[in-house]
Amino acid sequence: MSWLSDDDDDGDDKYADYEARARPNPKGNKPRTKIRPEHGDAVTGRVLTVDRGRYTVLLGDEVGDTVEEHELTATRARELRRQAIVTGDRVDVVGDTSGDEGSLARIVRIQPRTTVLRRSADDSDEVERIIVANADQMLIVVAAADPEPRPRLVDRYLVAAYDAGIEPILCITKTDLTDPAEFLANFAGLDLTVVTSGLDATPTERLRELLRGHTTVAVGHSGVGKSTLVNALVPSANRAIGRVNDVTGRGRHTSSSTVSYRFADGWIIDTPGVRSFGLGHVKVENILRSFTDLAEIAEDCPRGCTHLPGSPDCEIIDRVGAGELGDIGRQRLDSFQRLLASLA
């Protein structure tokens, strides 16, 4: 096939006999395509933990699932390299799903999530992170003392829970050291379920009742006794337990990974202790949804109303100030405004 000829017809067609040849492919790579395999033979499992690009997945935990329940190690497929896979995710896996030592399966799909708990970038972390997926409850663990409770951190946990559509439960530990009444007064306006325990006692029966049949993510500042609670509920967990630094009064990080444990027809997910919780992703309307009485009044607020103190013509502030909702209304407005302020 002629590749190029001279147009001046002077007989100088030096390229007339040149034959174009395909460029050799020494690696033998197949041509790239955007068509992805359907993986019709994939099986579905639950991500129990994530460790440096390797995922522990439990197969066979679904009702009616014919796959024998066992754990396996998997990596992510190339097409998922830009998607976060986190503890609690339901995923489809292919490849060697036997779970035998040395075997490695591949995660090819993430099933739609019912909820996503995330923390935004903040001073301690420059990257927004998804913490867990598909949880429907959040167990917020706080010590009455040693270390001192931090109401504003609890506020931020609550905001994250409300934004994700997750029901919060507040658990106060070490109540034999200090009466938690003053601390709990900060949340008097919220419909919070509260469970208390002492230094050497854990309210396991009450928690078992509340956590049964749910997927619950446990969060809390380092040293508050969160891992102690998890060990009491799931003895086989063997989560490391730390002590509070006598000088700084801060807890030491003992849980370094987020791990899911089967518990009472449900799951409990233990997370590493955190000292901050970025909320840049949260929308005000998601918090307001959790205050159903205030949300109904907010429908009469002017467009763009922030509902914060000093907001002009805020219907919530005006009606609560007029005493229409009584003392509980004032408490709930105070709690709502504190949660809004935590976004800043």
Image (spheres, rainbow, N blue to C red):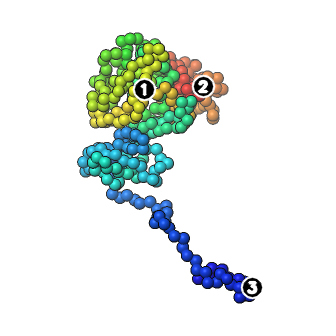
Q: Which mark is residue 253?
A: 1
Task: Give the structural element (helix, strand or loop) at label 2.
Answer: loop
> Looking at this view, is 34 or 254 the one in front?
254
Distance Cα–Cα, label 1 vs label 3: 82 Å
Nearer the N terminus, badge 3 or badge 2? 3
- Tell me whether circle 2 and circle 1 mark residues in contact (CB < 8 Å): no
Image spot of residue 36 (x, y percent): 44, 60
Q: Which of the 4 image quarters holds residue 264?
A: top left
| Residue drawn 28% across the image and 24% down it | 205
Question: Is residue 56 at least partly visible in the picture?
Answer: yes
Q: Amino acid at mark 2?
A: Leu
Residue 144, image x and y in percent?
42, 16
Q: Nearer the viewer, residue 10 or 331?
A: 10
Closest to the camera, between mark 1 and mark 3, is 3
Q: Quadrant of residue 140?
A: top left
Q: Secondary structure at mark 3?
A: loop
Taking the spot 58% from the left edge, 77% from the top edge, the residue there is 20
Foreground residue among 145 and 139: 145
Pointer 2 or 1: first along the chain:
1
| For discs 3 and 2, the disc positioned in front in the rendered view | 3
Count of residue discs = 3
Q: Position of residue 188 (x, y in %)?
A: 46, 19
Mark closest to the chain's N terminus, 1 or 3:
3
195 lies left or right of 160: left
- Name which residue lies at 51% across and 31% down: 287
Type of amino acid at the residue the image marks with label 1: His
Point out which mark residue 8 bears: 3
Q: Secondary structure at mark 1?
A: loop
Q: Which residue is mark 2?
A: 308
Above or below 273: residue 39: below
